[in-house]
Image (cartoon, coloured by chain):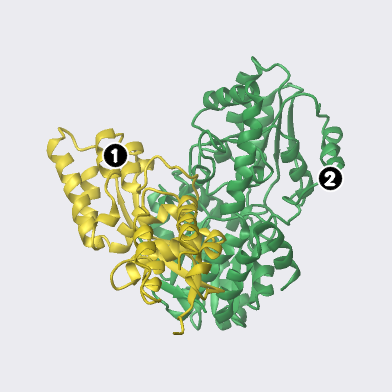
Amino acid sequence: MKIQEFVIRDCALSAIATGRKAQNLRELRGHLLDVHPDAIYYHFWGGLLRPRFDDPEFNNDFAAWARHGLHDHLLAERLAIIDPTDFDDLEGLRAELIEVIEERLDESELVPWAKADEQFHFIRSQIVVFNTRRTIRHPKNLAAAAAHMSLGSVFFHLIDARRRTPDGVDDFRSWLRDVGDGYPELCRDIASVDPYFNTLHNLRDQITSIFRRHSGRK
Amino acid sequence: MGALLDALSEITGEEVIEHLHQLAEPLRGMKVVHVNSTRVGGGVAEILHMLVPLKQELGIDAAWEVIEGEADFYRCTKGFHNALQGGAVAVSESLIRNFEETNRKNAETLAPKLRDADLVVIHDPQPAPLLRYTPQRKGKWIWRCHIDASRPYRAVWKYLRRFVAEYDASIFSLAAFSQALPIPQYLIPPSIDPLGEKNRELRQEEIDAVYGQFDLDRDRPLIVQVSRFDRWKDPIGVVEAYKMAKRFLPTLQLVLAGGGASDDPEGEAVLAEVREAASDDPDIHILLLPADAHTTINALQRAADVVLQKSTKEGFGLTVTEAMWKGKPVVGGNTGGIRLQVINHHTGFLVSTPEGAALRIRYLFNNRERIDEMGRKAREFVRENFLMTRHLREYLTLMVTLTLGTGNRVELE
């Protein structure tokens, strides 16, 4: 049987300001009601490809703003624990964000606010996808290829893929399911990788390690 | 591949350059014109000196034009600059008339190039009205704002906004600088050219030369701020911070090195104030350098132990990027684009007062190993995020999107 090649792609995000900004928690909630879903995506996932050091204090921008802009530690912790992979789509994620914020507004005597130069700015992103001209012909070659993937490739195949593939999985599982018997054990191990509470460096290491463990079994 | 791209690939890796080629493919042969108001001095001119030849190497027909005006025009645009940064600057009707008339004349002179261009990028407020005075244009027009316009003086912004809103898109360095506009606002931080005279690697003797040239003692601690003599860069605050730190570090030396830009008429007044503040301290070296003293600035930044950029407003702060690229920790003002580069305790320290700057200077000289550690992190941070290859990639993406209308996903083969 001829195997369809896995084409390795790379990507970068361009940021576009929406012009929307919030100076207090009520304004943040108001914008979240109808801001473009791409903005919610960017503020949860965009940080992985932005200038920053690995090991950030918070994995999404809403939690970071709650902590550093509003100085509301409790809200920051509640927002930080929201995992976007728990939701089928961005609308579910949006609803959860609003729920957490409304709960906090209900229990607050005063609406938490930020200084003028610490406002929350809603940004959306545009993705640029590159063809690296590299392909993988057989699953046994996945480990070698993954070890040398750029961080943009890791983002594209493990994270962006969830918005593209019909069943919302990464590109590796999507490809493996069409190859041979579908590599169920390998797919199960890939599924166990947590793409959110992680850095792209770590994701690359983890996925490479999984591929190495499984290479030779087939 | 061209010579510039070849040389860059040795710093960034070949993959980064391959991305640029892929992005430029659909743009080959396209006529792109950049317009600003000065060919020398300031960050915008430096960016264009590198960006335009790179676009040419990628097969894009890129050109750079400069508008010309009289003294009143620059007085007016300096007022605009200060107003966009939040200063309550009243600009007289006669200066406004001069501003519009100067733009109308420049539009006439540049008409053939601007009309035929597929893409025109107008930098900062000085040439913003050119679009209005170029009615028969065929291409897309972008307004690129390099200024910290986070809290502009409303009267001036209201006036400038009328011109800006007519563009097809705008570019700001940070989200905080963006404004309510009916056009897309792309966020693209600027960058440095690692191959240029100001950032290239220097031989030790080239660095050593500045000690003799400016009477500096290489065995004593040295802090340096490189920037125009401009109030927003807070050179007086730097002198105050130095004086406070000097009480604890008696051998400390300070260099304040700046040049003028041809579109900045306030520089001399600020320079006089700084000289007054420095009084007769022989360890404060105020250097007024010509606009092309790039090698000297490069050497001074490399000679420094710690670099300061104590701005109170800053569009981006390319001098911060330059210092970090040379492996120096930066004590920077907690404002604008400096926040994007100086990551507290990683690449330097953000400060809000001369006292804060003095405290961090003392800390670093009392913990010398932190100077080296932060410097190493700073250089890698710039390599990943603030070299011109990233800047160019984002420009090309915007060009592809605007001219080909590819929506939220740009897929290149």
Q: Colour of chain A?
A: yellow
Q: Residues within 10 Å of mark 2 (few under 14, many from 20)?
A: few
Question: Image quarter for residue B48?
Answer: bottom right
Question: Is B40 placed left or right of B163 in the picture?
Answer: right
Looking at the rendered structure, the kind of residue marked 1 is: Ala
Q: Quadrant of residue A74?
A: top left
Q: Which chain is home to disc 2?
A: B
Residue found 50% across the figure and 44% down from its top: A53
Q: Which residue is mark 1?
A: A76
Mark 2 lies on residue: B203
Q: Is residue B197 above or below residue B300?
A: below
**Residue A82: image location, x then y, percent:** 26, 48
Q: Residue furthest left?
A: A106
Q: Position of residue A115 (x, y in %)?
A: 34, 38
As drawn, B25 above or below B218: below
Depth order, front residue of A146/B109 = A146
Nearer to the camera, B127 or B189: B189
- In the image, what residue type sits under mark 2? Arg
In the picture, the quarter occupied by the N terminus of chain B is bottom right
Q: Residue at x 84, y 45 (%)?
A: B203
- Residue A76 in percent (x, y) is at 29, 39
Count of marks placed on residues: 2
Q: Which residue is pictured at 62% across the width and 52% down the height?
A: B383
With B322 as the anchor, is A47 left or right in this view?
Answer: left
Residue B89 lies, with reference to residue B16, above or below; the image says: above
Between the residue at mark 1 and the residue at mark 2, the CA separation in whole angstroms equals 49 Å
Residue at image point 73% right, 72% down: B2
Chain B, colour shown: green
